[in-house]
Image (cartoon, rainbow, N blue to C red):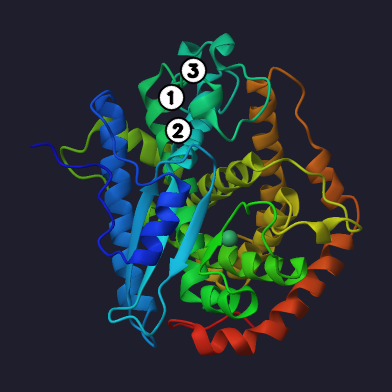
Amino acid sequence: MRKILPTPPSIMNDELEKIIESKGGLFVLDSEHTINTIQIFETINSIFDRLILEAEQELYKDKPRKISYGIIANTNFNAFAYASSQEEEKPFDFVGINIGTIFTLLDIFGRILSHPDNLTNVGNSSLEKAERTYISYLSTDVMKTQSMSCIPNCHIRNSYSTNLMITALKFLFYHEITHLRNGHLEFIKEELNYSYYQEAMDTGRKRLDPVIHQALEMDADSGAILKVLNESFKLMNLSPRDGVDLNILAVFNYSYLDIRISTKTVVFSTYILFRLFDFIEWNYFNQDKETHPQPPIRMFWLSCTIYEIFRIRPEYNYNADTFISDATKIMLEAEITLGKIKNEEPDTRGIQSVVSTNLHLEYLNEVKKAWKDIRPQLENYKRGGNLAD
Ligand SMILES: [Zn+2]
């Protein structure tokens, strides 16, 4: 009998079962999918299993509990985290990722690499045809809106795009793990009496003060970027062994050749992930209506976190100021690649709305102040490790 993909959750309770049912149930790959899709799901399963094992062993030291995950049969671009109560016989944490998230990410990175003008240094871009890639807007429900997914003709560019998709997915998965690990779920339960934390919120739900909500999001983003960067840096030092598929070797070289390229791989995929949420120019005077920091500012704040890593760790040999200027270039390049598949000029309004003034730093201080206020509460709930100052 064929193995069931993706793997069903290893732990479950009645409450979680009801939550999953309300969102569409668990997703199972049926027989119509291609070998390529099956391989992608096997890869995703093995990465999630590994990330979970590492988190349980290395991070959940103060309050050990099991972590499990599931792919939800819902076409929207969304993810959620759930924590069982501590009173449960075997307390556990859970990450749910919508199937729509996986296919939307596959589609966007496939489309970007299918355009001959995008990332021309990767593989053989002259094999690509621009007309195949055109879309009128960035959809977050591609399973409903796009009838055909777009796969690059050049097999190296195809593998490279899958790797970018996996990088973005790892970021999202670890973002959810950080919500759980740092006690955000118990905080939400105490404040709002919700048993799970969903990224894109259903309308009509009671909400936290947006500045506090954004402080939690910033914390989850920081945990995720540190992990994904670390993984990327480890791949940099991998030496090719005999028998390694040349295609895989090429993708490694394009993605992790040195510190700048490894960092770019992470920043580029993460920015595209953020950008899939509705694109809103950042505005100091309306930011407090949003649950998440708006996409451009989210990336700028993450860049500040990465800047600090390079500043205090000279052994990485990446000048922190050079990184900041590279980060802006990467965001601009990402906008250019998105412009190409929309067959229009790049939309730099979001980036401009942040870099044109220093108001984002002022707002960052407000969010940091909210973080300081809630930090003592989170200290009681965190599973282990140190919370950010
Ligand atoms: Zn979040």
Left or right of 310 on screen, residue 301: right
Marker disc for residue 226: none
Q: Is residue 193 above or below residue 108?
A: below
Label 1: how many residues lie within 10 Å, few (<14), some (14-19) or many (20+)?
A: many
Of labels 2 and 3, the one closer to you: 3
Q: What is the x, y in percent for residue 347?
A: 78, 32
Q: What is the x, y in percent for residue 223?
A: 53, 67
State the residue position of label 2. 161
Asked which quadrant contains residue 73, the reply is top left
Q: Amino acid at mark 3?
A: Ser
State the residue position of label 3. 147
Q: What is the x, y in percent for residue 207?
A: 70, 65
| Residue drawn at 33 percent across, 55 percent down | 48
Q: Amino acid at mark 2?
A: Ser
Asked which quadrant contains residue 184, the reply is bottom right
State the residue position of label 1. 123
| Residue drawn at 53 percent across, 47 percent down | 78
Q: Secondary structure at mark 1?
A: loop
Q: Secondary structure at mark 2?
A: helix
Label 2: how many residues lie within 10 Å, few (<14), some (14-19) or many (20+)?
A: many
